[in-house]
Amino acid sequence: ILLFNYHENNSTMVQGVAIINGVIQNTNPATGELITSPSIKVTTISEIANVISKANVAQAAWSDLPIADRISMIRKGITAVEPITQKLADSITSEMGKVPAEALEEVTDANGLKGEWLDMVADANADVKLPGNGAESVIVRDPLGVVAVISPWNYPVGEIPLLALPALVAGNAVILKPSEVTPVTGAMYCEALASALPEGVLQVVQGDGDVGSQLVDSKDIHMVAMTGSTNTGKRIMEKCAGSLKRLVLELGGKDPMVVFADADLDKAAADAVGNSLYNQGQSCCSVERVYIEESVKAEFEKKVVALAKEQKVGSPTEEGVTVGPMVSEMQLQNVRTQVEDSIANGATKLYQSEIPAGAGNYFPVTVLSDLNQNMLIQRNETFGPVVAVSTFDGTEAKAIELANDTEYGLCSYVYTGDLKKGARVARKFRSGQVGINCYSIAAAQPGCPWIGHKGSGFGTHSGMDGFRSFSVPKSLVFTTSAP
């Protein structure tokens, strides 16, 4: 997500979205038609200043409330979202093309955070007593102040609470800038959530990189939490360095899946296809590189192609469609360039589906084989409905070498019938999460942290470590027992 491109009255933004006369030109990627209702205006510089001022005033009173009271209000806010679950799902489909079942799952999962997950956030922020020799120290946690949350277009509901809720629980106020690609969805979710909170504690601003820059540059913003591209993360980091703002950055990925010959090949093939194509492949933790042991290459590829042929590309609202449009013409061209480059450089196209004629940013489900590490599709994020298969010699050393041969390190996956081997290989992968015979983000326990190694992130969100990222510890030291 690009945040720092200056705009005048008419401008292009992330994914080619335009601003005309201060209004975001919101487009349905399945049809190319403008979404005119509601009309989303870009927040002006003076309005941003007022939002930041209001947030700082509200934060002082919010942080004075007991954490139990803050949790209770946040739960009521999530409950206020539940009646508009279907409306939010429909908005996701309209704005970024996600198929309805996946869009509904996204919103339902976000609503589900109000139970055990929210209790864990509260526990992470609880006081901790450290006894010793008749004296005690107490570690308490202070909020940072006002947190700017910059959310992505590919999960326009799901990513917001993962960053905003721990910030709110810790006693911060939050200003959300939803992606300009999905402005209606982000605003709708936050307005419902904020309805149960004190005024000013959770606010929304809209716009492109200029708006993001105003937030990041402000001395009255005390932390930035962003999900987006690695390049954007680096720019935010540079801007925050001068004031040493706290950061949580969930960035890009080029996630590898290693399949040994002793794996359950049916499950491995199903996961390779399903997790390469979910959300049109537009997930930071999509499977983007599949390494199959050479001795079972033909068998595995046959299974992959058979499963790929079951997919249907088309309008997400059409019955039977499993893969919708790319979010934009720009993203469509990115995927097309990578696929064409790989074929021109010796890759084999095992399968390519049909796509609808006419309008819409559709790319065919594609299965590629015989890839090498120098191809664009093995180096750069693809973010498209492509299953990219290459081989390795079956040794653990080669599997580890290939999986780690990337600037990214968000997730990795290893499939084998030998769990000890799987654990050995997983420990050597340089990524934040590794699924052994599973898609890790779907199977992970709620306490698992989420942020990548290397160019895939900075800081942590989710899990006990991540929940504490939105506050700072302070030690109260007594020479007696603490009161």
Image: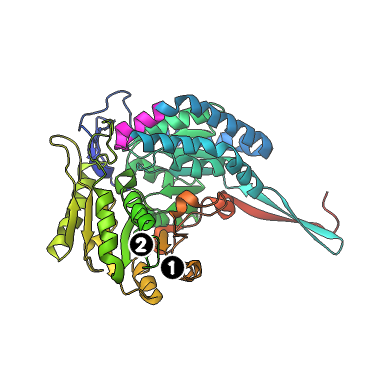
The foreground one among 114 and 440 is 440
The quarter of the displayed image where residue 370 is located = bottom left
Dot 2 surroundings within 10 Å: few (below 14), some, or many (20 or more)? Answer: many
The foreground one among 450 and 149 is 450
Q: Element type at marker 2?
A: strand
Q: Residue at x 31, y 48 (%)?
A: 277
Say whether residue 88 is magenta. yes
Above or below, 358 against 38 in this view is: below
Dominant secondary structure, magenta? helix
Residue position for label 1: 429
The quarter of the displayed image where residue 68 is located = top right
Residue position for label 2: 256
N-terminal of the pair, mark 1 or mark 2, is 2
1 and 2 marks in contact (CB < 8 Å): yes
Range of residues picked out in magenta: 87-99
Q: Residue at x 26, y 31 (%)?
A: 318
Question: How far apart are the two marked residues, 1 and 2, measured between alpha carbons?
Answer: 10 Å
Above or below, 325 against 37 in this view is: below
Q: Residue at x 46, y 40 (%)?
A: 160
Q: Amino acid at mark 2?
A: Pro
Is residue 270 in view? Answer: yes
